[in-house]
Amino acid sequence: MKIIVSPSFVSAFNLAAEEYFFLTREKNLLLLYRNNPSVIIGSNQAVLNEVNRDFCIDHHIPVIRRLSGGGAVYHDRGNFNYAFIRDKGDTPLSAAFLEPIVKVLHHLGIPAEIGRRKDLWLEGRKISGTASHISRGRELHHGTLLYDTDLEILRHALSAQNKSPIKKATASVPSPVTNIRSYLSARRGEAPARETFFDLFHRELLSFFGTDDRTLPGHAEIAGIEVLQESKYTQRSWNYRM
């Protein structure tokens, strides 16, 4: 398993990176990244149904549409993101892709559990939502991991004001959420800083997969990602197409 850590905090770049690696047919890849404040919506969602646009405009929070389905999520640098990209297997779509994440969290003293929507929960609150995209014999399974996200900003950004929702669009399913850092602070009296925990998290993933193959995207890969970023993920025609 190759683990790639994105050098960028730009949401459009990181979503383009997911699609770039999905299309280039690199096998057994795990992409890790963090984003600047942004709202990420599912491929079949309507922005007006999911997002408080006035709040996001006032707080300079971009709205980016991702490749996969599912619901809207808020990202900032306290939210960690993982994307498993691989050739399609023979087994039906399941939550099995979450097993490495769960085992690493357990090793770090965080008793996360897999929920019925292929999400992760901690003491009755959600800490990770996931989504998937399958096409042309390839699979993308990605998710968030709330470590130290600004939950007040999250609530405001995802409080849509639309009184006449677009019915054909996929609707998000609201859930109570919490931060892993709050859990660790309550149990231990202190918790690692964001950067420290992120480093611990991906070092534990390296250990889980028995590899030291951790890398940054190469120059040619970055160039390809940036082309996709500019041609798609920064375009209003993609992000606001519904």
Image: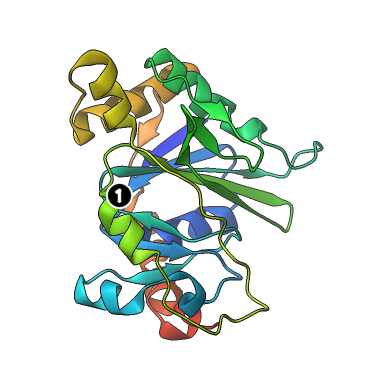
Relative height, residue 4 to residue 186 (above, below): below
Report the amino acid beneath label 1: Leu
Residue 88 at x, y = what percent? 72, 44
The one nearer the camera, 166 or 93, is 166
Residue 199 at x, y = what percent? 27, 29
Label 1 crowd (10 A; few <14 / some 14-19 / many >=20) = some
Secondary structure under tag 1 reads helix
Q: Residue at x 49, y 25 (%)?
A: 112
The one nearer the camera, 205 or 25, is 205
Q: Residue at label 1?
A: 151
Q: Quadrant of residue 63?
A: bottom left
Residue 192 at x, y = what percent? 20, 25
Q: Residue at x 57, y 32 (%)?
A: 98
Relative height, residue 64 to residue 114 (above, below): below
Relative height, residue 47 to residue 37 (above, below): below
Relative height, residue 127 to residue 74 (above, below): above
| Residue 73 visible from this viewpoint | yes
Q: Quadrant of residue 62?
A: bottom left
Q: Residue at x 61, y 71 (%)?
A: 44
The one nearer the camera, 119 or 199, is 119
Quarter of the image for the C terminus: give it.
Answer: bottom right
Residue 65 at x, y = what percent? 48, 69
| Residue 8 visible from this viewpoint | no
